[in-house]
Amino acid sequence: QVQIVESGGGLVQAGGSLRLSCTASGRWISVWDWYRQAPGKQREWVAQVGPSGATHYVDSVKVRFTISRDNAENTVYLQMDSLRPEDTAVYYCKGEAYWGQGTQVTVSS
């Protein structure tokens, strides 16, 4: 049975930083993704990291967000810097076919 547990998130002022993490158990995850869903909007893909560390980002977060992984810990991170109010959303990690429970990120102006 695969479980993915998210942590991090919270309330931060615009320009601030937060770090999210997800840890998987029951299966080693080769490809990790982060998604987010703002109120009234569809879930949006944010970033991906492959097994060798190759990364991809949606244009709106490039330079500001960094996805990384710790293969030994089966964990993925999302470092979010220079946060903007429009980054406010529930953030979800996805390890292959498995989703985390989501964590709220709120950025105040």
Image (tube, rainbow, N blue to C red):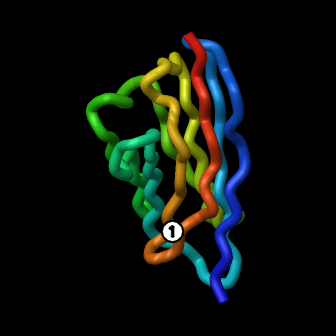
- The percent position of residue 8, horizontal first and vertical second, equals 71, 42
Asked if 104 appears above or below 73 in the picture, the reply is above
Q: What amino acid is found at the position of numbered circle 1 in the picture?
A: Gly
Asked if 27 appears above or below 42 in the picture, the reply is below
Furthest-left residue in view? 59
Residue drawn at 44 percent across, 57 percent down: 33
Using residue 87 as the reference point, say whether residue 28 is left or right of it. right
Q: Quadrant of residue 78?
A: top right
Asked if 33 appears above or below 10 in the picture, the reply is below
Q: Quadrant of residue 19?
A: top right
State whether residue 39 appears in this view. yes
Residue drawn at 65 percent across, 30 percent down: 18
Residue drawn at 64 percent across, 82 percent down: 2
- The percent position of residue 84, horizontal first and vertical second, equals 48, 18
Q: Residues within 10 Å of mark 1 (few under 14, many from 20)?
A: many
Using residue 48 as the reference point, say whether residue 66 is left or right of it. right
In front: 68, or 38? 38
- Where disc 1 sits, the SS reads strand
- The percent position of residue 109, horizontal first and vertical second, equals 55, 10
Which residue has dot 1 on it? 95
Furthest-front residue in view? 40
Number of residue marks: 1
Residue drawn at 47 percent across, 29 percent down: 87
- The percent position of residue 95, horizontal first and vertical second, equals 51, 68
State whether residue 55 appears in this view. no
Using residue 90 as the reference point, say whether residue 46 is left or right of it. left
The quarter in which the N terminus is drawn is: bottom right
